[in-house]
Amino acid sequence: MTLLKREFIVNGCTNEMEVSSHETLLNLLQQRLQRDDINGGCGRGDCGACTLLLNGQPVHACLVLAAELTSADVVETAGNMTLHAGNDRHIVNAYQDHAPGICDFCRPGLWISTKALLSEVPAPTDEQIREMIAGHLCYCTSFDQLVEAVNVAARAISEGGT
Amino acid sequence: MDYRQPLTLAEALTLLRDAVAPVHLLAGGTDLIPQLRGVNDPTLTLVDLKHIKELSEFIIRADGSVVIGAAVSAQRMKTNRDFNRFWPGLHDAVAVMGSRQIMSRATLGGNICHGSPAADTVPALIAAGAMCRICSSDGERMVPVNEVITSPGKTCLRKGEILVSVSLPARPLRSTDAYLRITPRKKMDVAIASVAVNLTIDESLCVLQCSVALGAVAPVAFAVSEASEFMTGQRVDQAMMARLQRTVRQASRPIDDIRATAEYRTQVTGLLAVRAFEMAFARVTENTSRDQNS
């Protein structure tokens, strides 16, 4: 098995590891780095459970090979969003208050997709929010609650404050 | 499995030329990585093309001509305003390729080389008259995009060749395109029929040139040359639309499958063609009147 030396940043911490050529970023985060804020579902980019930010872009961790990472790559998972005040906290709070029924399996990916959407479109329309939700196979709660949570987060961010 | 990350096109082509075992080319990986799941063939080589300059270029010139590197992501194309202005139909095709996460990774080259009959960008590229630059260590060749996919999942790429970029021609005056598709579900689904129209009209609103291409209704996407022939030089009216609908339905060769019947696909393709034409015509007349008023 070929092992490759890789350096990359996860939630602000630099990691230097040897990765195998067929190992996905999802496997690396879950099994090697023991992260519990990312979930694996379908393994083919359908369910959205493993969504994270790679250099600010939302991606499926199951569709990225660990070998593809370089020292310039910055990975952010949902757990990081609970650690800080500010915009991330508004998203976390909005989901807690307006979509409380959402399970631990779907939540991390949806937080990340919401963060990506609001950084690109600060005041999204309901249609844009539903398009974002369509990237997640989540039937935990009503889609209306998810739309409401994203709208509340968008308003809280635009009004500022922590 | 061996993983290689060449930084230049020459390096990648040398790797491919010298390979003795199977090689997979990796760009976005949205199709390839699930296929490789569970495969741990030590002889296999994966060549990551994302760090090669020629495959990452996205050039839009003032005349509307475009060069898109094969590893340019769908999201990069979707968010480019000039690309949307010159090629709104192809832009619409790119925009429906998948979820936001898929858009971050999926590439134009991958969408072509995966060889799906229902690939969204392919009909729009065929209608646009796109040319593919294919390179090997022996040289390069330019191939019309409709000749690249030879059958479902198969391309004309030979051993040692890479699809480097796709070129779109300059935009003539009063010219635009449109792309429409039908999917069983509204979002995140594969087309059961798709139509792209690339249209140029003259000052009197007659058709100067019109290309119509169909996807998901034959083993590979294709251009309906009969439609282009009868529309050239004609005035746009109800009779033309009725004939376009008939011509497209006759040209369709769909199959029955779990997602739609052949009969439904045939019927809906004709309607889509008319709607796509009307959309392109509305866009081009709107652009023309805006240019005259400015």
Image (spheres, coloured by chain):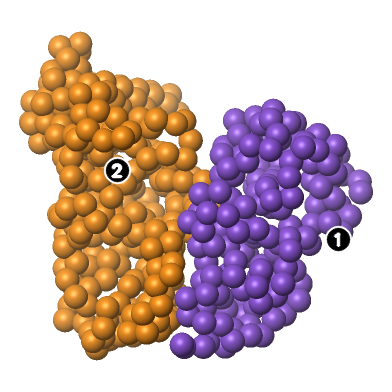
Chain colours: A purple, B orange
Q: What residue is shown at x 51% (from left), y 46% (from top)?
A: B99
Q: Chain of mark 1?
A: A
Around disc 1, counting alpha carbons within 10 Å, would you say few (fewer than 14), some (14 to 19), or many (20 or more)?
Answer: few
Residue A59 rendering spot, x and y as whole percentages: 57, 58
Rounded to the nearest whole Å, what is the CA distance between mark 1 and mark 2?
Answer: 43 Å
- Please indicate whether residue A57 sits to the left or right of residue B118 in the image: right
Residue B36 rendering spot, x and y as whole percentages: 40, 68
Res. B118 mark: 2
Q: Secondary structure at mark 2?
A: loop
Q: Secondary structure at mark 1?
A: loop
Q: What residue is shown at x 73% (from left), y 38% (from top)?
A: A150
Instruction: Check the image and report above or below for A90 versus B294.
Output: below
Q: Mark 2 is on which residue type?
A: Ala
Q: Nearer the viewer, residue B131 or B191?
A: B191
Give the residue number, with chain letter if any, for mark 1: A83
Q: Nearer the viewer, residue B220 or B239?
A: B220
Instruction: Check the image and report above or below for A62 versus B123.
Output: below
Residue A102 rendering spot, x and y as whole percentages: 74, 41
- Please indicate whether residue B238 sits to the left or right of residue A36 in the image: left
Q: What residue is shown at x 80% (from left), y 52% (from top)?
A: A88
Residue A136 rendering spot, x and y as whole percentages: 59, 44
The quarter of the displayed image where residue B51 is located: bottom left
Around disc 2, counting alpha carbons within 10 Å, would you say few (fewer than 14), some (14 to 19), or many (20 or more)?
Answer: many
Q: Mark 1 is on which residue type?
A: Leu
Q: Can marks 1 and 2 be said to lie on one chain?
A: no
Q: Nearer the viewer, residue B38 or A132?
A: B38
The quarter of the displayed image where residue A17 is located: bottom right
Query: Does residue B170 appear anywhere in the picture?
Result: no
